[in-house]
Amino acid sequence: MKTEKEIRKEIFDKVKELYILRNNQEKFIPGKTNINYAGRVYDEKEMISLVDASLDFWLTSGRFAQQFEKEFAKFLGLKYCLLTNSGSSAKSFTTSIIVSWSSIDLLTDSFGRAQAFGLIVTSRNIDCAILKSL
């Protein structure tokens, strides 16, 4: 009977084989082939990582996220790094941390996103009636 490691290797080899098959069919013809300026850019390594995570059936951040956080923090020369699911979540997280320090003044422009303003108001427990009088 095969081990899990052996089965995974077979699966990864097939994923690589599929990637090569798909990319060998796409021949570039000058003046005819479209060149995308944006979109998905990946190779067999990303496909294998996706399948690897899927085989673990880990549907939220797990070992790959932890590895990325650790390596990215090291790359940036930081002690910690924390992933979020979107830019909005990152902004919410950062804003709520900043406004929790009462000695810090936080300014935002009047044309900024309502989300940032809402976080400042709720995190600081600001009475909006006071804002009207300013």
Image: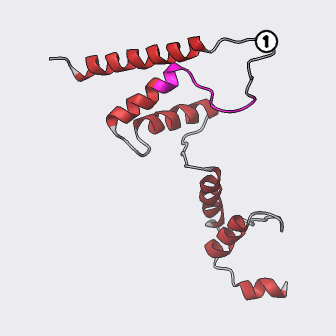
Q: Locate residue 76: give its quadrant.
A: top right
Work out whether residue 30 or residue 97 is closer to the camera in this orientation and state it: 30
The residue at the point 45 percent across, 38 percent down is: 66
In front of the other: 35 or 119: 35
Residue 58 vs residue 93, the one in the foreground: 58
Left/right placement of residue 132 relative to residue 100 reads right
Q: Give whichever of 132, 6 is nearer the camera.
A: 6
- Residue at which label 1 appears: 30
Q: Is residue 59 left or right of residue 22?
A: left
* Magenta range: 37-47
Residue 86, image x and y in percent?
A: 60, 50
Q: Is residue 36 above or below residue 10?
A: below
Q: Residues within 10 Å of mark 1 (few under 14, many from 20)?
A: few
Label 1 SS:
loop
Residue at 57 percent of width and 34 percent of height: 72
The image shows residue 83 at horizontal and vertical percentages of 54, 45
Amino acid at dot 1: Pro
Residue under the image location 54 percent in, 42 percent down: 80
Could you say where residue 25 lies in the image, as x and y percent from the top left? 58, 13
Q: Find residue 77 and report its image quarter.
A: top right
Above or below, comparing residue 57 to residue 120 in the picture: above
Q: Is 84 left or right of 35, judged from the image as shown?
A: left
Give the dominant element type of the magenta stretch: helix, strand or loop: loop
* Extreme-front residue of the structure: 32
Place of residue 94 in the rendered image (x, y in percent of width and height, measured from the top left): 63, 56
